[in-house]
Image: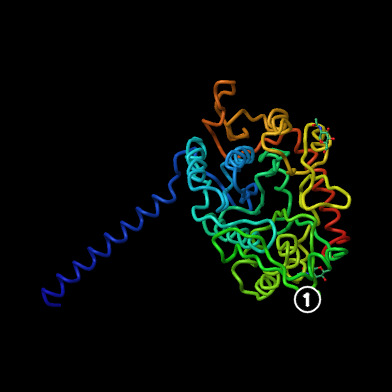
Amino acid sequence: MGAEKKWLLTLFSATFLSLLLLLLSSISAFSSPKPFPSIVQHGSHYSPAFAYYIWGGRGDRARIFRLLLAVYHPRNRYLLHLSADESEEERRRLAAAIKAVPAIQAFGNVDVVGKPDRITYMGSTNIATTLRAAAILLKVDSGWDWFVTLSAMDYPLITQDDLSHVFSSVRRDLNFIDHTSDLGWKELHRVQPIVVDPATYLARRSQIFHATEKRKTPDAFKVFTGSSPWVTLSRSFLEFCILGWDNLPRTLLMYFTNVILSQEGYFHSVICNSPEYKNTTVNSDLRYMIWDTPPKMEPHFLNTSDFDQMIQSGAAFARQFEKDDPVLDMVDKKILKRGRNRAAPGAWCSGWKSWWMDPCTHWGDANILKPGPQAKKFEESITNLLDDWNAQSNQCQ
Ligand SMILES: *[C@@H]1O[C@H](CO)[C@@H](O)[C@H](O)[C@H]1NC(C)=O
Ligand SMILES: *[C@@H]1O[C@H](CO)[C@@H](O)[C@H](O)[C@H]1NC(C)=O
């Protein structure tokens, strides 16, 4: 071996060694425990975590912030969407309010959609924005188990400790979605009309327009609908809808693009027409609502007269509420034990609790849960739903 070669060999081994050392040190930097408060554990050995998509329209900033605090937990992930008809200033104020909450800043688990879409209740924009939100949440966080949709008019009836505790005993591939194939009057009025939603391609908001013809109810797949667009979907089902290894979600998306209320049928029809997923449907939206008979577009506004019945219902969420209705203060006080402008406390909050101090400005182990009294009611209703699910009595029928 010549002197030159020897020199080269030394150089190579030195480079190799230093690279190896660099690699080792970076691996140990990743695996060494981070400072205590920020360790959040996810996975099948831990309690489940939730990805919340919360959206609202013009004038909804304060409601979205209040709802976020009511459902906040360091183990979850949140995406907030103030639709495009709200000003940039309001969106900035929302982001600033979020940044000012110490726990949210430390855990970094809340995002605001920076390039908002128009959301109209009718038409296909609604389902498009929900799919977009799910895609973002899948991408930014690998830890969550279920995707939950909420609007600014909703509110929780249990704490996040209750929710995660009860869902610990639920199979993580189950999907909670209210559905039926008994279309009834909806066949003529909701399924057959063809509509075009201009919000998908026009910057200025305008009403959907109806085509003069109707189309036949499809026969290549069965249309399912629910009285409710509100869903709690498993991570694996959303991957099925979004990653697109199967044609079904795409085919149905093309069909539902021209349906009046796409959000009342899209997920319902995809899941019930899919052989791999239809056995994972639990027929419930986990929401408390009061409908008129015959039902109108939206359920009643709930008020303090409904409080007792609402908390006895064993539902996880309720809708809909007027902005700052006194019944929300009752839920804060009696169920969430939440102070004004503070996150709903859970076992993760370790600070002193008093009127002048927020217990959630200090925290301990975020993976410990402490279910409260409402968890029992919710557990009963989940047990009943799972019994129905086992009996396969009202699944995708
Ligand atoms: C779903 O349930 C039906 C009826 O029990 C069964 O025949 C089928 O194999 C199940 N499908 C899957 C994918 O588990
Ligand atoms: C609550 O709403 C119902 C109608 O939805 C009304 O009859 C009742 O008076 C309201 N209660 C209060 C306390 O406002």
- Name the residue located 84 percent from the left edge and 52 percent from the top edge: 295
Q: What amino acid is labelled 1 in the image?
A: Arg
49 or 7: nearer the viewer: 49
Quadrant of the rendered image containing residue 61: top right
Image vertical order of residue 357 relative to residue 281, above or below: above
- Name the residue located 82 percent from the left edge and 32 percent from the top edge: 305
Quadrant of the rendered image containing residue 308: top right
Relative image position of residue 306 (x, y in whole percent): 81, 35
Image vertical order of residue 190 relative to residue 308, above or below: below
Image vertical order of residue 42 relative to residue 306, above or below: below
Image quarter (top left, top right, bottom left or bottom right) of the N terminus: bottom left
Relative image position of residue 363 (x, y in whole percent): 53, 33
**How was this image coloured?**
rainbow
In the image: residue 179, left or right of residue 10? right
Image vertical order of residue 132 relative to residue 157, above or below: below
Relative image position of residue 349 (x, y in whole percent): 57, 32
Can you name the residue that lies furthest to the left here? 3
Graded by Cα atoms within 10 Å as few (under 14), some (14 to 19) or many (20 or more), the crowding at tag 1 reads few
Residue 241 in view, yes or no: yes
User: According to the image, label 1 marks what residue?
Assistant: 215
279 or 344: nearer the viewer: 344
Residue 81 in view, yes or no: no
In the image: residue 288, left or right of residue 61? right
Q: Secondary structure at mark 1?
A: loop
Image quarter (top left, top right, bottom left or bottom right) of the C terminus: bottom right
- Name the residue located 40 percent from the left edge and 54 percent from the top edge: 27
Relative image position of residue 185 (x, y in whole percent): 87, 63
- Name the residue located 73 percent from the left edge and 39 percent from the top edge: 157
How many numbered discs sit on the rendered protein?
Answer: 1
24 or 268: nearer the viewer: 268
